[in-house]
Amino acid sequence: MYVMAGPAGSQSLRPLGLRSTPHALYMVILIVLVTMDSVFGKFLENRAPSRPLEWPKYLRCYRCLFETKELGCLLGSDICLVPPGSSCITLHIRNSSGTDIMVSDCRRKEHMQDCAYTHTSPVFGFWISSQCCFMDLCNDPQSRVIYNS
């Protein structure tokens, strides 16, 4: 145990109502967050949109024909467009050893029955699962982590 001598040794956070250093840090963080909210919140409230909000003409999706988590997209990285009401899709091809190969693409609304299913693949020991999402680039590698959590 270390003992501080002199004036520093007699100082305490207790007169401030703080029992420990972590408690003091939490209070500082809370004060900073409240200050930022009051300053930036009022700034953002006063901004009027420059034009009325419109629905986008197309949904943009990430496309990759062969991707792994370890190596990223190995074949065909691109962006595809589909009309509103369609979706972005990611197919996961997995096996029991933990291999996960992904295929990302656009899916027109006529083919939405492919969304959210799991079935065995024609190759023994592998199965395929699919996930659809409905926001711009929601199936790209960065967004996939957020939407699948």
Image: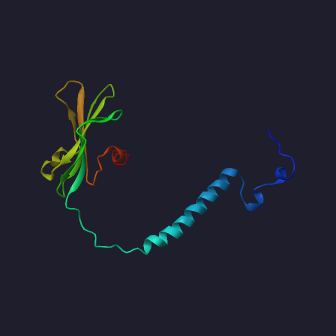
Here the colouring is rainbow
In screen coordinates, is 38 left or right of 86?
Answer: right
In screen coordinates, is 26 left or right of 59?
Answer: right
Q: Quadrant of the N terminus?
A: top right
Q: Where is residue 125, by image quadrant?
A: top left
Depth check, front residue: 91 or 6:
6
- In the rendered image, the vertical position of residue 14 relative to residue 51, given as above or below: above
Report how many numbered discs are placed on residues in the image: 0
Q: Which residue is farthest left?
A: 110
Q: Position of residue 86 (x, y in %)?
A: 18, 53
Q: Position of residue 87 (x, y in %)?
A: 21, 51
Residue drawn at x 24%, y 38% as measured from the top left: 129
- In the rendered image, the vertical position of residue 79 relative to residue 27, given as above or below: above
Residue drawn at x 28%, y 73% as measured from the top left: 52
Q: Position of residue 41 (x, y in %)?
A: 48, 69
Q: Where is residue 53, by image quadrant?
A: bottom left
Residue drawn at x 33%, y 43% as measured from the top left: 141
Residue drawn at x 47%, y 72% as measured from the top left: 43
Q: Which residue is farthest right?
A: 6
